[in-house]
Amino acid sequence: MAKFPLKYNEPVTISPLVIRVLADNGSYMTGPGTNTYLIGKKEIAVIDPGTGNNQHLNAIVDAAEASGKIKWIFVTHNHPDHSPGARPLQARTGAELFGLNPPEGIYQDYSFKPDRLLKHDEKLRTSEFTLQAIHTPGHASNHLCFLLEDENLLFTGDHIMQGSTVVIIPPYGHMGDYLKSLENLKSYKVDNLAPGHGQIMENPLDVINWYISHRLEREAKVVAALKRAGGQATIERILAPVYDDVPSFMHGVAAFSLEAHLIKLEEERKVVSSSGTWKLVSA
């Protein structure tokens, strides 16, 4: 698929069934901003209505009213850049909210409470399209991707992002689950990826395999850093060498993912932890 203009709060058609509206909340964490997707023509499903900014909500409603009515609102997960717009958009449209309840932890939007809790592989069938929910825990335990079967287009939320990797924040973020969820996506027929941040991505299998390889390479760096530290160290001691390819101003965020890697290794009995120190089982 072609690259599409990154215009804030303007509808951009990316396929016969899909319009994207980009929120004006770009940052080093969100890339160009949060992508809101509208699916359908007469009866419309919205995926990830964003922060709740009025200008963005107006843009979503205007894009829908050009052709139809918003009937369903889907949320991939409850981070503050994806779900706070759900309730105010529902108040304006009467749409039904779909998703999963937020887990306990930091950076969660507890304003979002779905009217309907989705099950793994559950489908919404309409006269225009079929949308399948795929539970993809890892970035968050309640994370969902959505597959538009009519176009083999997968809306990935923050499970896969264009131009960036994903932060895993324990305990509701889990590295082992994240890798399993990536592997699981290979079993679905997908032609293109529509991420929560960035451009449409082609060659989904290549993208997924790169994500898996990248995480395993990072895990190998964790083990190597522990070995160089004499077989045991704190997160603070090995953070810089493990993320030597990441700007230092992002190391505070990277520390979350480093902890997630260490927890995965501990669950595999490759390391043990005690009082903030992580030790290789066989240094």
Image (cartoon, rainbow, N blue to C red):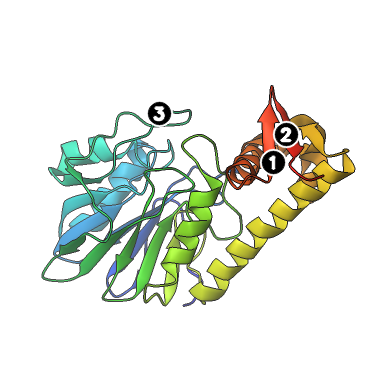
Q: Earlier in the sequence, mark 2 or mark 3?
A: 3
Q: CA distance from mark 2 to mark 3?
A: 25 Å
Can residue 160 be seen here? The reply is no
Q: Residue at x 36, y 71 (%)?
A: 153
Mark 2 neighbour class, 10 Å CA radius: few under 14, some 14 to 19, many 20 or more: many
Q: Amino acid at mark 2?
A: Trp
Q: Amino acid at mark 3?
A: Glu
Q: Amino acid at mark 1?
A: Val
The mark lying in front, picked from 2 and 3, is 2
- Cβ atoms under marks 1 and 2 closer than 8 Å: yes
- Cβ atoms under marks 3 and 1 closer than 8 Å: no
Residue 257 x %, y %: 62, 42
Q: Pointer 3: what residue?
A: 104
Residue 174 x %, y %: 51, 44
In the image, 238: left or right of 114?
right
Disc 2 on helix, strand or loop?
strand
Q: Residue at x 29, y 75 (%)?
A: 16
In the rendering, which numbered label is found on residue 135? none
Report the label total: 3
Residue 81 x %, y %: 44, 40
Q: Residue at x 65, y 41 (%)?
A: 262
Q: CA distance from mark 3 to mark 1?
A: 26 Å
Q: Pointer 2: what residue?
A: 278
- Cβ atoms under marks 2 and 3 closer than 8 Å: no
Q: Quadrant of residue 85?
A: top left
Q: Pointer 1: what residue?
A: 271
Residue 3 x %, y %: 51, 71
Q: Is residue 51 above or below residue 220?
A: above
